[in-house]
Image (cartoon, grey):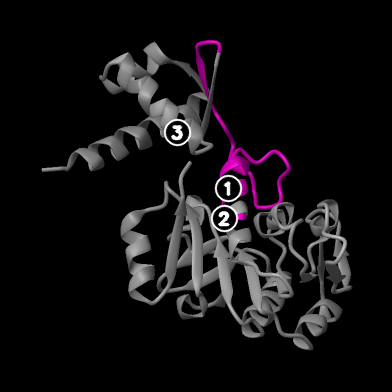
Amino acid sequence: MKSSNQIIKQRRDELTTYLKKSQVATVKELSDYLGVSEMTIRRDCEILAKMGILERSFGKISYLKQADEQSKTDPLNKIKGKIAKEASNYIDNGQVIFINSSNTAAKTLEYLTEKSITVVTNNLQALKYQKNARSNVLLTGGEVNYQKEVLIGDIAFNSFNSMRSNVTLIGCNGLDVQTGISTSQLNEARINRKIIENAGKVIVLADYTKIGKVSNFTVGSVTDVDLLITDSFADPKMLEKFENHGVQVIQVPI
C-alpha cells in the first residue's frame, strides 16, 4: 500500500504532466481530471507554485517552463536566492572565495557586502553585485562566452590553477551519490574540477531540481563536498545518502 506522501507526490506529478501538455488549466479542470476536490488542487498548486513549477493567476493555472542555470527569468530564482543567502553565512572576513559560473553561487555576493573578502571567479555576473570597499574581485580572464557571461579556456583554468581558496562556492547541473557533481558544459568541466581541487572547503549550492540528477560531465565526487545547501523540496532520502557519505546538508525553508 502506498503511503500518503507517495500518493501526494504521484498526484502532483500527474498534475504537472497534465499542465506540461495543456500549458494552462482551471482548478475545476484539474479537479475533474485527477478526481480530487478543488481544495486539494488549490493546496497542491500552492506548493507547486513555491517550487517554481507553475503560476496561478486570474483563476488559471499555468505551467512554467524550467530555465537553465544562467536564465534571468528562472522561475526558481526565489529558491536560489534563499540558498545563496544561506551560503553567505559560511563566509568569513579575510577569506579567498572561488565562485564558478553558477548564477546561484554569484548571487551569494549580494549578501556579503558587510564582509571583506577576495573573490576569484570566471563568472562575469559577479560584477553586477555591490561590493564591500575593502573586498577584491579577481576575474580569471579567458575567452568570453557571451551567452552565459562566463570566462572559459586555458587562461581561466590557469588562473585557478595558481591559487587556493579558503572556500569554494559551486553550482552544478546535477548532484548524485554515485556520479558526484556534474555539469552540462564541456568547456567549463575542466575549470570546475580545478576549482574543487584547489579548494579549502567546498560548498555546493543546488536547488531541489539538481538533487539526484546526473548531467554530462563529472567535475567532482560526493566526497569532495563539505557542505550542501539546498531547499526544503529536496528528496529527503537522497539527502540522507549524502549525509551518510560525510556531507553536511542544510535545507533552507521555502
Q: Which one is in front in this view, the residue at disc 1 or the one at disc 3? A: 1
Badge 3: how crowded within 10 Å, few (<14), some, or many (20+)? Answer: many
In the structure shown, which secondary structural element does the residue marked by tag 3 occupy? helix
Instruction: Give the Cα separation between the discs numbered 2 and 1.
Output: 6 Å
Res 48 label: 3
Amino acid beneath label 3: Leu
164 displayed left or right of 247? right
Question: Is disc 2 placed on a helix, strand or loop?
Answer: helix
Any magenta on residue 73? yes
| Position of 95 relative to 235 (above/below) | below
Q: Which residues are magenta?
A: 58-84
Q: Is residue 129 left or right of residue 200?
A: right
Residue at position x 71%, y 75% in the image: 95
Disc 2 marks a residue whose amino acid type is: Glu
Are the two marked residues, 2 and 1, in contact with CB atoms closer than 8 angstroms? yes
Classed neighbour count for the residue bearing mark 1: other residues with Cα under 10 Å, few (<14), some (14–19), many (≥20): many
Mark 1 or mark 3, which has the lower sequence index?
3
* Residues tagged 1 and 3 counted as in contact (Cβ below 8 A): no
On residue 86, the disc is 2
Q: Residue 144 appears at what percent x and percent y?
A: 87, 64
Report how far apart the C-alphas of labels 3 and 2 lie in the structure. 22 Å
Measured as percent of width and height from the top left, residue 76 is found at 58, 42
Q: Residue at x 84, y 68 (%)?
A: 137
Image quadrant of residue 41? top left
**Given this view, does label 3 or label 2 mark the residue nearer the observer?**
2
Residue name at image x 28 percent, y 35 percent: 8
Residue type for callout 1: Lys
Look at mark 1 in the image and give the residue it sits on.
82
